[in-house]
Image (tube, grey):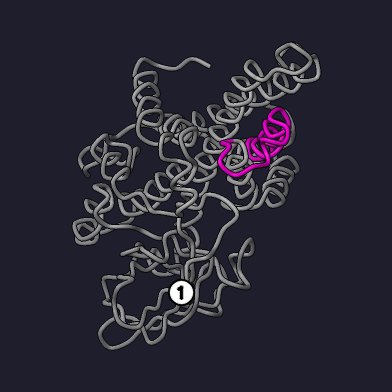
Amino acid sequence: MHLTETHLQIREMTRNFADSVIRPVSEELDRDERFPSEIYEEMAKLGLFGICVPEELGGPGFDTLSYAIVMEELSRGYASVADQCGLVELASMLLAQHGTVEQREKWLEGILRAEAKAAYCITEAEAGTDVSAIRTRATRSEDGWLLEGEKTWIHNAPIADVGFVLARTDPEAGHRGMSIFLVDLNSDGVTKGRREEKMGQKASPVGGLSFQNARLPKNALLGEEGRGFHIMMSVLDKGRVGIAALAVGIAQAGLEAALEYAKQRRQFNRSISEFQGVQWLLADMAKDIEAARLLVHSAARKIDDGEDATMACSMAKCFASDVAVSRTSDAVQVFGGSGYIRGFEVERLYRDAKITQIYEGTNQIQRTIIARELLRNGARR
């Protein structure tokens, strides 16, 4: 698929950054589960945060395809870093599209400059795929709002400064009774839970949040009251493109590692790359990764062209994440016993890949969305 000169320049810059800054410390970050603030400060200086935020609001003003390219290349370096880029993209676009001047002045610049950390707060213990089941409640008070409830498995929760919190403002109105609030997560009434010990993407912290008698000012409401579900859903297509691109980056890193190892590793007095069984593993990895990348780019272009991109984004996310898991497994297979040992890149990549089938909507819900769109609109393109 054709990329413009601008897209190629963005890819080259991000690839160089990933190779020179991220990859050399990826195993250390995974081992120590350390949030690499210094990397994010450099990313902010390069304009890799809030990629689609308009220039007049402090962003670089690039398109969704640029965002997908950046996510893939960062993920080649380390998926936890790309994950943070994706989180900033969603938070900054919510502010850019729905925030007041006052809200943007308070939070947007800090988020784009990596000085303030954001958390996207939807999931609850009984409300994962089923967002309509959330119980967190915001009620009006004399001077603003009173927030009560709990969120779980929230990216950045242990370290975040501001939370984009989805809460019920009208319990009887279903989806139309939800609103989004900008919550200072270092204020009274907010408790940050313990940091979860994850299987992969260990440098991107996840934890819970508890709101008990948390008092919010009137201007904490983001957008219109009762439009929270719609606003959150409005960024999900882009979020799924981002995760799909991240998954492609993980798989690409696995292919590169497996290819290099296959050329170097010798058995029976020759390189294992000469064995057909290994060649077929590498070939299947390459073709599936390229197919996933094309799906991602196609979905991104649909968003940029203003088309209905829901099915394309679900296809890209579902296919790319399945490829990431299956093909990093193949990379481990090429490495043999070494691939099962901590310290080898492919072992980490295999662990990092699994969550891509779960977050931003499980692959089961993606298949449901694809089937719904097919049944509604037919199969003709």
The quadrant of the image that shows the C terminus is top right
| Viewer-nearest residue: 339 or 254 | 339
Residue 208 pos. (x, y %)? 49, 71
Is any atom of residue 311 visible in this view?
no
Residue 137 pos. (x, y %)? 47, 80
Residue at position x 39%, y 63% in the image: 164
| Viewer-nearest residue: 91 or 222 | 91
| Viewer-nearest residue: 161 or 194 | 194
121 left or right of 248?
Answer: left
Residue 250 pos. (x, y %)? 56, 35
Overall secondary structure of the magenta stretch? helix
Residue at position x 60%, y 30% in the image: 254
Is any atom of residue 161 visible in this view?
yes
Residue 331 pos. (x, y %)? 67, 31
Residue at position x 22%, y 51% in the image: 109
Residue under numbered circle 1: 193
Give the quadrant of residue 217. Answer: bottom left
Amino acid residing under circle 1 = Gly
Q: Badge 1: how crowded within 10 Å, few (<14), some, or many (20+)? A: some
In the image, is residue 225 part of the stretch drawn in magenta?
no
As helix, strand or loop, the secondary structure at mark 1 comes to strand
Say how many tags the image has: 1
374 left or right of 309?
Answer: right
Report the magenta residues as a range: 320-345
| Position of 243 relative to 110 (above/below) | above
Residue at position x 36%, y 29% in the image: 20
